[in-house]
Image (cartoon, rainbow, N blue to C red):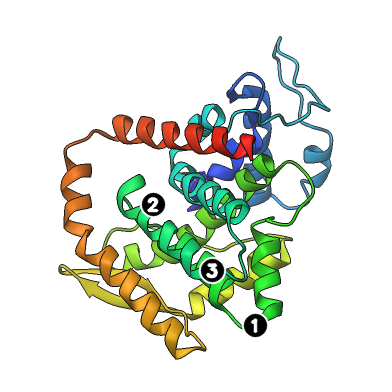
Amino acid sequence: MKTKKVIGSMAVQELSWDFAKLSVDAIKYRRLNSALESLLSEPLQLERIQNKIDHEDTLVSKSSSKRSLDNIHLNSEQNIHVVPTMCVLLKFYELSKLYDVEKDYKIIFKNLCSFMASGINMVGAYELSLLQRILFSQNIDKVKEIRRLLKLDSKSDFKKNLWNASYDITFMRSLNALPVQAMRGEPINSIYNPVLVTKDIDLASMTREILENTEIAETNGKLYPHLRFELEKEEDKIFIFSCIESLKLLSQQRYSINKKKSLSQRMEELRETIKQTEERINTL
């Protein structure tokens, strides 16, 4: 994949994940990689993909296995990039069960900020931006679009929905962050212009909006994407500003805490947060 100037996407691994065995299905993984490589190197390879390229393997992949997410914290081992997002979305799901989203939107937002500042010691800009739009936007259609994207109103298993929504947000982050990373001289595999190919209309629409409302600014001598969201009400602007300022004041403290911990330790703490939040939701 590297020779084709393509970043091996986590989507390949996610689609190969065996939710029962908590591991990647090796056959699915190789088939997907082989299919992508064929598409990138030779024309008219759809027949090979549809025929599920034969492999000399003793293992047999399940063709109709059901995705089971009884415990999100166990399956989150699959990809560390989505673990923080799962924490935030689960917290929002819990808060939306405890409070009225339309009436208590300020309480929910303040609790979310507090959770990010001290609960997980990190601030997810993309998660916060999307949830901020849900809570404060006066554009009903836009709110519905984001709720569809995050699958908050779906009647099916909320754990599966939040798993999928976490990946969608991670794709947004990659599409925005990778070009900026290249601008400051740190491209991945010399790639600087990633492209999202999706049939998900809401994901495409919201990703486009996020990109259009991003400013490139310098922080501590490095370029970073900064997300913007224009609020309609002046009182909401003041409230949001105070919450964000509080998050900024604690940024050095969060940095100091996280710096003392290894990545594996941080991931273990985040997974424990997912587990505890999940257990509380199951009782609501």
- Which numbered mark, 2 or 1, is in the foreground of this view? 2
Q: Can residue 117 be seen in this view?
A: yes
- The residue pinned by badge 3 equals 105
Mark-to-mark CA distance, 2 and 3: 15 Å
Which label's residue is closer to the chain start, 1 or 3?
A: 3
Question: What residue is shown at x 44% (from left), y 90% (from top)?
Answer: 234
**Is residue 192 among what the camera can see?**
no
Alpha carbon separation for disc pair 2 and 1? 26 Å
First of labels 2, 1 by sequence position: 2
Which residue occupies the foreground of this view, 31 or 144?
A: 144
Which three-letter amino acid code belongs to the residue tagged 3?
A: Tyr
Residue hosting label 1: 139
Q: Which amino acid does label 2 sit on?
A: Phe
Residue 3 position (above or below residue 33):
below
Q: Which residue is identified by label 2? A: 115
User: What kind of residue is marked 1?
Assistant: Asn
Q: State whether residue 243 is above or below residue 40.
A: below
Give the structural element (helix, strand or loop) at label 1.
loop
